[in-house]
Each structure stands twice: as C-alpha cells, then as structure tokens.
Image (cartoon, grey):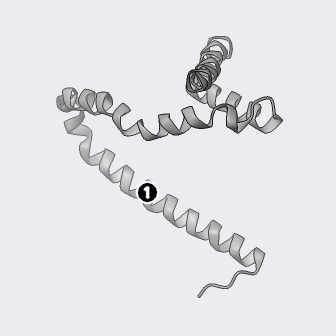
Amino acid sequence: MKFLRQFMIILLLSFLGEVLKMFIPLPIPASVYGLVLMLVCLMTGVLKTSQVKDAAFFLIEIMPVMFIPAAAGLIDSWKVLQPLLLPILVITVVITVFVMVVTGKVAQMIAQKRGIKNE
C-alpha cells in the first residue's frame, strides 16, 4: 500500500505538470513542470523524501526498459534519420566534448576556491 501511495504522489505531481503546461504558453515539456513541482515540494518540506523514495528508486531501476519503445520508434524512422546521421553524430560529439571541458573547468574552479590541491 505504501508503494502505491508513493507512486500516486509522483503521478499527481506529473498530472499537475500537465495542467500547468496547458495554462502556461511556454515551450517547456509538461514533465519538466512536474519535476519542478516535485523539487519545490521537497525543498519546502511539503513533501518528504521518505514519502516518494521507494517508488522513485523503482522508477529509476526500470528506466532502461522505458527506452525500448523509443528505440523501436527510431528503428522505424531509419529512412528519415539516415540523411541526418552525420550531422547528429558531429553535433553529439562536439557538445559532449564541450560539456566535458566546461564541467572539468568548473570542477577545477570549485576545487581551487575550496583549497583542494590537484594530485
């Protein structure tokens, strides 16, 4: 019963994200609204982590399974995606390297501010 209650809380916040999406005309996915609502509830203490922890862990554990339908959809769309494959790969590699460099620089900056020496 506890697991069901936790799952229903997560679904309620997701539903509220869908409602917000209908009323706020921004190009932001409804799931992001739901995640922001979850963050606000957790940060303000309206919701305790223990109230959603078990269901959240379960959802994270099964996340790879949730990508199977999306991957199957990509296989179905191969003819449309094939001409775009090279630009997508180039963009993915460039952005990945960029994110790695920026993350490394930010980590170095934080380490220097805290006085942590690099060994």
From the viewer's perspective, tell me whether residue 74 is left or right of residue 119: left
Image spot of residue 88 (x, y percent): 32, 45
Image spot of residue 109 (x, y percent): 69, 72
In the displayed structure, 112 sits above or below 47; it is below
Outermost residue, right side: 44
21 or 97: nearer the eye?
A: 21
24 or 19: nearer the eye?
A: 19
Q: Name the residue tied to disc 1.
A: 96
Task: Quadrant for residue 72, please give it.
Answer: top left
In the displayed structure, 77 sits above or below 50; it is above
Residue at screen point 72% across, 78% down: 112
Outermost residue, left side: 79
Residue at screen point 82% across, 35% down: 44
Residue at screen point 55% across, 32% down: 55
From the viewer's perspective, tell me whether residue 86 is left or right of residue 20: left
Packing grade of label 1 (10 A; few <14, some 14-19, many >=20) is few
The N terminus appears in which quarter of the rendering? Answer: top right
The C terminus appears in which quarter of the rendering? Answer: bottom right
Residue 98 visible: yes
Image spot of residue 50 (x, y percent): 68, 37
